[in-house]
Image: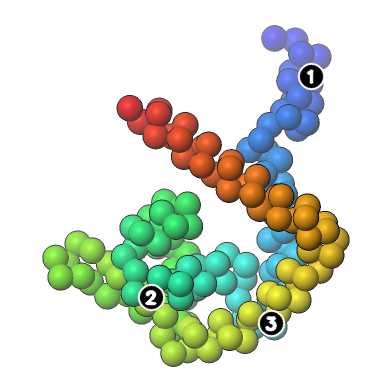
Amino acid sequence: MTSQSREIDAAELVRNCACFNLRKAARAATQLYDAALEPSGLRATQISVLVAIALHGRVPLGRLAETLVMDRTTLTRNLRPLEKQGWVVDERGPDRRERYLELTRAGRAVLERALPLWHGVQSRVAAALGAGRLAGLVGELDAVIRAVRSESAADRR
């Protein structure tokens, strides 16, 4: 492969690769949301975990990982600072292999402080994109998740 063909392949990747561009967009959005959430002490990745736990109530680690489209190891690593802060409690299930997660009172309080900040940045993003375009984007991202999960399941067969 010549250096010119490698440059062309790299340019094509930058232009067309779904993964490359989704990750780039995710980093840009994360930076914006992190800056907005900073006064609450939460990061964008943390608020999504806390919200998912709040929606489920007491939730098994595996179900939370599936909801967040994360592997259990990454989720466990992301939970450590939340547990250390006293925002999430991790309890063993009846068979001791299952782990259940639940928000603490402090976790609910930090989420209450963060939600107005989240609403503010979310409103700015909605205004910048337009409500219809944002709704379309969220719908398209859901379609991407379904398609990728379908491909992953097919690969495992």
- Taking the spot 51% from the left edge, 42% from the top edge, the residue there is 146
Residue 132 is drawn in which quadrant? Answer: bottom right
Q: Which mark sits nearer the N-terminus, 2 or 1?
A: 1
Q: Are marks 2 and 1 in contact (CB under 8 Å)?
A: no
Q: Which corner quadrant holds the N terminus?
A: top right
Q: Residues within 10 Å of mark 1 (few under 14, many from 20)?
A: few
- Residue 154: % across, % down: 40, 29
Residue at mark 2 to residue at mark 3: CA–CA distance: 21 Å
Which disc number belongs to residue 8?
A: 1
- Residue 56: % across, % down: 40, 70
Q: Which corner quadrant holds the C terminus?
A: top left
Which disc number belongs to residue 57?
A: 2
Q: Secondary structure at mark 3?
A: helix
- Residue 21: % across, % down: 71, 40
Q: Residues within 10 Å of mark 3 (few under 14, many from 20)?
A: some
Give, as a three-letter code, the residue at label 3. Answer: Pro
Residue 46 is drawn in which quadrant? Answer: bottom right
- Taking the spot 35% from the left edge, 31% from the top edge, the residue there is 156
Left or right relative to 113: residue 133: right
Q: Secondary structure at mark 1?
A: helix
Q: State how many labels appear.
A: 3
Residue beneath disc 3: 116
Q: Nearer the viewer, mark 2 or mark 1?
A: 2
